[in-house]
C-alpha cells in the first residue's frame, strides 16, 4: 500500500460522506503548480475553484499571514483592527461603492449570500428572483436561492418567496413587479458550466430593478477579484448594483467572504441585525488587503484579460472535434464539448499532470491563478489536447 492509498483510506474513515473521495493528496504548491504525496507535479488550472488568485505559496500571502499571526489573529467583533478597516476601504474603492458604501465581513461565500438574503427582507417585500441553474451555496438560505432542483430537493421545504426564472430578458421583464424585493444573480453562472447571461441582461436588470424599487444583488463570489478581466464582472457592463457578494479570490486561499452595499442599501442593516464571531478577523482581512493590493500592483486584472484571450484563441486553434465553443471571460472559461465526456477529459488531464474541472457532462471549467504567463499557457496547450484525445 502506498502512502497515498493509506491517506485516502484514512480520509474515507474520518470525513463526512458528503465529501468526495479525493482525486489526489496534495502536499505543497508553488505558483501555478502543486505536488501530490508521491511527488508528482500538476499544472493547476482550477486554483481551488477560482480561489487561489495569486497561486500557491505567494510571498505576499506567506509574509502577510506570518506577520499578522505574530501580532493578533482574532479579537471578536467587539473590537476592530487596522487590517479590517484597510481591507474594507480598499473594497469600497475597487467596487465603486465609495463613501456611501459599507462592508460586512464573514467567512465564506455562502455566508455573504446569507447576509444579502437577510438584507432583502429589510425592504419589507418577500419576493426574491434568482435564475434557473444558478448556484449560490449550500446553507439553507443560499440553497433556497440556488436554481438547481437536484441540490434542493432533499432539503425542502426551504425558505419561501424565492422564484427561479429563466435567464432571458423576456422572463425577467415578465417576473419583475412592485412586490419584488430583489433580483439576485451571478453575472456568469460558474457552476452551471461558465454560462454568460444574454447581451444587455445586466443593463436591463438594472433598469427594471430601479423602475420597481427592487434591489439588484450580484453574486461575484466566483467572478470577482479581477478574474474576468475587470475587478468585478458588472464593471464590464458599466452598471452599479445595490449589493455584491464576494469571497474566493479576495483571500487567495484564506477563508473569507464579504457583502458590499452601495448607497441607500447600506442603511438597511442596523445594529444587532447581523453578525459573525470570526467575520472580519485580523488574519483574514490582512490577507484580503494584501491580496487585493498585490493584484493591483502586479497588473493581474489586465493579465487575466490578456491570458484569457490567449487561452481562448489557443483552445479554439487546437482544431479538436471535441471542442464546440469557449465561454466566459478572462480567466474564468468554460470549454463546451461536443460530447458528454467532460469527466473523462478531466480524469485524463489529471493523469497527464493537469488539473481542470468537469463543471457538468459537457463542460470543462478553467480558473487558473491570475499570475499565469506564457509558460503556463504553453504547457496547458500541450497537455489539454492530449487529454481530449485520451477521452475521445
Image (spheres, grey):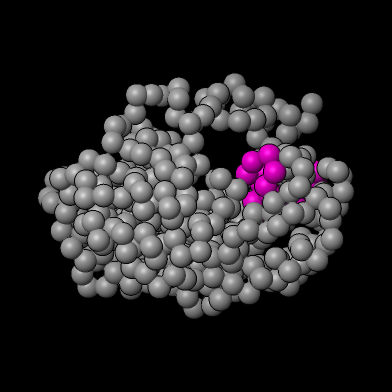
Specify the segment rendered in magenta. 347-366
Residue 162 place in picture, x, y as percent: 33, 38
Asked whether, in this view, residue 260 is left or right of residue 386, the answer is: left
Is residue 340 shown left or right of residue 382?
left
Q: Is residue 282 left or right of residue 187?
A: left
Residue drawn at the location 26% of the way across and 62% of the way down: 210
Q: What residue appears at the point 73 percent right and 29 percent down from the top-left corner?
A: 5
The quadrant holding residue 237 is: bottom left
Location of residue 218 in the rendering, given as x and y in whole percent from the top left corner: 38, 56
Residue closer to the observer: 269 or 234: 234
Which residue lies at the image location 29% right of the left edge and 58% below the top edge? 209
Depth check: give the residue in front, 286 or 361.
361
On whether residue 146 falls in the magenta region, the answer is no
- Quarter in which the N terminus is drawn: top right
Residue 385 x/y as whole percent = 83, 55
Identified at 63% across, 58% down, the residue is 327
Amino acid at each position: 500500500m502506498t502512502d497515498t492509498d493509506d491517506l485516502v483510506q484514512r480520509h474515507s474513515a474520518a470525513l463526512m460522506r458528503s465529501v468526495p473521495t479525493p482525486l489526489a493528496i496534495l502536499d505543497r504548491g508553488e505558483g501555478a503548480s502543486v505536488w501530490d504525496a508521491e511527488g508528482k507535479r500538476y499544472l493547476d488550472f482550477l486554483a481551488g475553484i477560482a480561489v487561489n488568485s495569486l497561486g500557491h505559496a505567494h510571498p505576499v500571502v506567506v509574509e502577510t499571514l506570518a506577520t499578522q499571526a505574530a501580532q493578533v489573529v482574532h479579537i471578536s467583533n467587539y473590537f476592530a483592527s487596522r487590517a479590517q478597516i484597510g481591507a474594507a476601504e480598499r473594497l469600497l474603492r475597487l467596487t465603486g461603492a465609495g463613501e456611501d458604501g459599507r462592508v460586512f465581513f464573514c467567512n465564506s461565500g455562502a455566508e455573504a449570500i446569507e447576509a444579502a438574503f437577510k438584507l432583502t427582507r429589510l425592504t419589507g417585500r418577500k419576493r426574491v428572483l434568482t435564475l434557473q441553474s444558478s448556484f449560490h451555496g449550500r446553507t439553507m438560505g443560499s440553497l433556497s436561492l440556488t436554481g438547481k432542483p437536484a441540490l434542493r430537493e432533499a432539503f425542502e421545504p426551504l425558505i419561501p418567496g424565492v422564484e427561479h426564472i429563466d435567464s432571458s430578458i423576456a422572463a425577467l421583464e415578465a417576473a419583475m413587479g412592485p412586490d419584488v424585493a430583489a433580483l439576485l444573480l451571478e453575472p456568469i453562472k460558474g457552476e452551471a458550466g461558465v454560462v454568460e447571461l444574454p447581451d444587455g441582461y445586466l443593463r436591463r436588470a438594472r433598469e427594471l430593478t430601479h423602475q420597481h424599487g427592487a434591489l439588484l444583488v450580484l453574486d461575484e463570489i466566483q467572478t470577482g477579484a479581477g478574474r474576468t478581466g475587470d475587478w468585478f464582472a458588472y464593471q464590464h457592463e458599466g452598471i452599479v448594483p445595490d449589493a455584491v457578494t464576494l469571497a474566493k479570490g479576495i483571500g487567495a486561499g484564506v477563508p473569507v467572504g464579504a457583502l458590499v452595499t452601495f448607497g441607500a442599501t447600506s442603511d438597511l442593516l442596523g445594529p444587532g441585525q447581523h453578525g459573525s464571531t470570526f467575520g472580519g478577523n485580523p488574519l483574514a482581512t490582512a490577507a484580503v488587503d494584501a491580496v487585493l493590493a498585490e493584484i493591483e500592483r502586479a497588473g493581474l486584472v489586465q493579465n487575466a484579460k490578456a491570458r484569457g484571450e490567449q487561452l481562448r484563441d489557443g483552445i479554439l486553434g487546437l482544431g479538436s472535434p471535441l471542442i464546440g465553443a469557449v465561454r466566459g471571460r478572462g480567466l474564468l472559461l468554460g470549454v463546451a464539448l461536443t460530447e458528454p465526456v467532460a469527466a473523462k477529459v478531466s480524469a485524463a488531464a489529471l493523469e497527464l499532470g493537469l488539473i481542470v474541472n468537469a463543471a457538468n457532462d459537457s463542460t470543462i471549467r478553467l480558473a487558473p491563478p491570475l499570475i499565469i504567463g506564457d509558460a503556463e499557457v504553453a504547457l496547458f496547450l500541450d497537455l489539454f489536447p492530449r487529454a481530449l484525445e485520451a477521452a475521445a
